[in-house]
Image: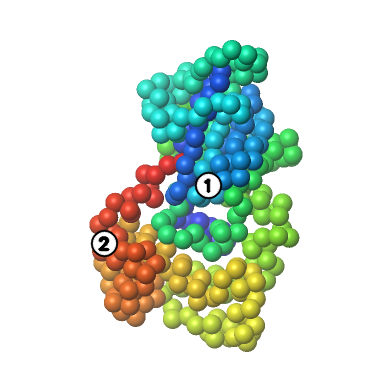
Amino acid sequence: MDLLSRISDSIQGSVAARARVSGQWGVRFSCDFAAGFHVLLKGSCLVQCNTTNQVLQMVPGDIVFFARGYYHELKSDPGANCVDVRDFRADLNMNPPESSRLKQTVPGMTQSQAEDTSFLSGRYVFPVGPLHPLFRALPEYFHIKGADLPLHDPIKGLIQILSQEFAREDASDAILSRITDTLFHYILRHWMLEHDSSSHWAALYADEAVLRAIESMEDRMEYPWTVDSLAGAQGLSRATLARRFKEATGTGPMEYLKQIRMQRAARMLQNGEGNVEHISMRVGYESPFSFSRSFKRFYGLSPREFRASDATQATITRSL
């Protein structure tokens, strides 16, 4: 598997909502645990990021992607009141997606506001805890304009398939989830190619020694890696690998290893994959005690507390 597949296999994708709206409308998205995208299928709308107040204008075929942790609003116009997405989804659950509408007619409404707007929203739920080091390179949000994509670009094709599947009466959650996962990879690839001179991803893929070191850690997490052993495998000195690793990823090799071990352990605890002793060995710790101590420093809970707490379910149930 390629590196992107390795480090994103714990991210769960799903379709959050698809609806037609008209009049003056707005939906507020909060994304503590999730990243997400919106694609406009018909009409027009505005996207406002609450942390910067920047407003993006969307037209059909456009996608806007938000990294984890950024609140934003989708709305008809700057003055529209917004409802929380959970309330919006509750309304959708009571009405068929294609017939449900947020509709409010107000004096002075323009013809474009009165017309239908169709959008589809997806979400990607990340594990609890700090983001994978490479995902920190993602910007707060980025806007992919449909008009700028080639005619047969895979992103356009996936959006069409996603929309068609969601509109079916027998729409499959499994199919929707897999399409959304695939779209996530294409969106990231598009961003990396567009920003190939300014991201950790670009620096990483440009340094084969660092890339191989990361692949070694990802593939053999149980091995007692050190900076010396990683450097020696690449024919580099310890200082050279450490410097190049920091330049490419923004973090040191051992800090990177600790973070991916903790994230793998959290996922194993969530999935019930063995007891604490088994998990500690699988992620490269010599004893359950040292593993539990590191895990608690990382997550604020012991492994047993983490497994028993509602926090393990938050990554699955918390939506945009």
250 left or right of 127 in image? right
In this picture, is 67 found above or below 220?
A: above
Which SS class for mark 1?
loop
Q: Position of residue 105 (x, y in %)?
A: 54, 14
Q: Is residue 95 visible?
A: yes
Q: Identify the residue under disc 1.
A: 70
Question: Which percent across, then down, holds residue 107?
Answer: 59, 12
Horizontally, residue 306 falls left or right of residue 245, namely left
Residue at 63%, 78% in the rendered image: 243
Residue at figure coordinates x 43%, y 21% from the top left: 96
Query: Which residue is depicted at the point 57% across and 29% down?
Result: 75
Please tell me whether mark 2 sits on a helix, a strand or a loop.
helix
The residue that label 2 is drawn on is: 305
Q: Circle 2: is it few (<14), some (14-19), or many (20+) Cα within 10 Å?
A: few
Instruction: Where is residue 284? Give x, y as percent.
Output: 39, 76
Counting other residues with Cα less than 10 Å from the Cα at mark 1, is it few (<14), some (14-19), or many (20 or more)?
many
Amino acid at the residue labelled 1: Tyr
Mark 1 and mark 2: span between their CA atoms?
28 Å
Going from the N terminus, do you reach mark 1 or mark 2 first?
A: 1
Q: Which is more toward the observer, 300 or 117?
A: 300
Q: Are marks 1 and 2 in contact (CB under 8 Å)?
A: no
